[in-house]
Amino acid sequence: MTLNLKNANVVGDFSAYVDQASGARLLSCLQCKKCSAGCPVAGQTDIKAHEIVRLVQLGQEKEVLSSRMIWECTSCQTCATRCPQKVSIAALIDTLRCVSRAQERVNERTTLPAFNDAFLDSVRKRGRVYEVGLMAAYKLRTLRLTEDMAMLPLMLKKRKLRLLPTEVPGSVERRRMWKRAKAAGGKRL
Amino acid sequence: VSYLFYPGCSLHGTAWDFNESTKQVVKALGIKMPEVEDWICCGSSPAHQTDALLALALPAKNLLAAKGKTVAVCCAACYSRLKTANHHIANEPETRQKVAEVVGTDYDGRTQVRHLLEILVKEVGLKKIASTIQRPLTGMKVVCYYGCLLSRPPEVTQFDDPENPTLMDQLLRAAGAEVIDFPHKTECCGAGYGITDVSLVTRLSGQILAMAKETGADCIATACPLCQLNLDLRQSAIEEDQHTNYGLPVFFFTQLLGMALGVSSQALGLESLVVNPNELLATRGMGA
């Protein structure tokens, strides 16, 4: 299949927003596929890294935002490191995660947003992650109650879990930080 | 040079032995490294996947708390987040201003951040470390596993060669170990997916363990709390899944170096390791 692209096709609202917010420089992509060649999840995911870039260029919002890929990416940064054109693919995927959540298009197979929320709540309240509380909150949100419980006795025996949380002063200030970041749209650029 | 230590949440939790062994190593080398006062979480992956501004504001708040002193870090994820914040804040005026509005204070992105490996190899120096070794790790065949975030992306971390880092190799060689070349030095272990999608960790960490075994190594040295957890705590589940047996102890590099510096296994938190290293240590004359 041959696609004849003009610049006009690749600067639609969606692609322009994502490109600007991520600083990814999408139009530099040569489709050399070096990103996907080194990607640890390329073999299992639905849309590979180089395909994500192309789909965003073409404004294929729905495919990208509801893909499994944006929640299976481990943020290992191999793609961005090896890209000969310095396209920040890992940053692009982070932006897509935010847009996917804002538009409520998160792929139903992932529970990562629930984990992320539980994690950030823990940090906002206490200043540091409290693993026992985090796992309880995550399990309640996802109802994955029994998974991984087999690890618990071993982790306790090895003193890997603190039974009591640490509280760092400044919770009021942290709540303000969270609010101000949200008010600014969570965008760096 | 004096440092302020940013341990991060993992070193106060699952990787408490990384924290203890770090304290022992720096003490033995005469480095002072008190903690950053009232440090908070760097935000880790949940922050950068959720809110790009918060993901920079949390590191900025901690770096401001260091009041200009160089910040020492052990956790690869914290290191990556602090370095990423510095990179964007120092190079993008618009980002700097937005972060200042979220934090409530302007931060210039110029507080120095160093990983303990950089401090030991580039600042303390291998010569000094070699001269301090009391019980060389003679005969210990080690592969060094760096994981993703120390060396990638290189323009942000400026740590070492992104495809073939050697700082840990050099350090453990200076401590007397036989460091074996390892093609999977910077492959991904599956990171935090142990909680939300464990099959991913089983597959990726499994490949790293298989390659380590293939090289003939006795054990793996790591510099990241999450990598260590995936390779050690989940090793028996991976062995079961792959119908094989690895039996590879997974140390923090500070535990191996600490032993060579003459620190006791107890003080280095070796009891925290899930794959028991005692038999290996006994056969290499490093038993307690």
Image: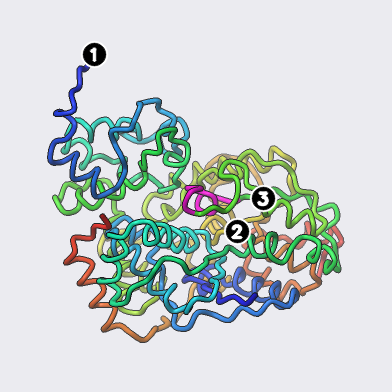
> Distance from label 1 to label 3 (Cα)?
46 Å
> Residue at left 36%, top 43%?
A88
Residue B244, placed above or below residue B273: above
> Residue at left 85%, top 61%?
B136
Residue bearing mark 3: B144
Residue bearing mark 1: A2
> Distance from label 1 to label 2 (Cα)?
47 Å
Q: Which residues are magenta?
A: B146-156
Return the residue nearer the eye: B119 or B253.
B119
Residue A74, placed above or below residue B41: above
Q: In the image, A115: left or right of B18?
A: left
Residue bearing mark 2: B223
Q: Chain of mark 2?
A: B
Residue A187, placed above or below residue A124: above
Q: In the image, A174: left or right of B140?
A: left
Q: How is the image coloured?
A: rainbow
Report x, y in % for residue B30. 73, 78
Report x, y in % for residue B164. 62, 42
Instruction: Give the numbered dot on residue A186.
Output: none
Report x, y in % for residue B51. 27, 60
First-in-chain label (2 vs 3): 3
Mark 2: which amino acid?
Ala
Category of crowding for the residue at label 2, using alpha-carbon neighbours closer than 10 angstroms: few (below 14), some (14–19), many (at least 20): many
**The stretch drawn in magenta includes residue B149:** yes
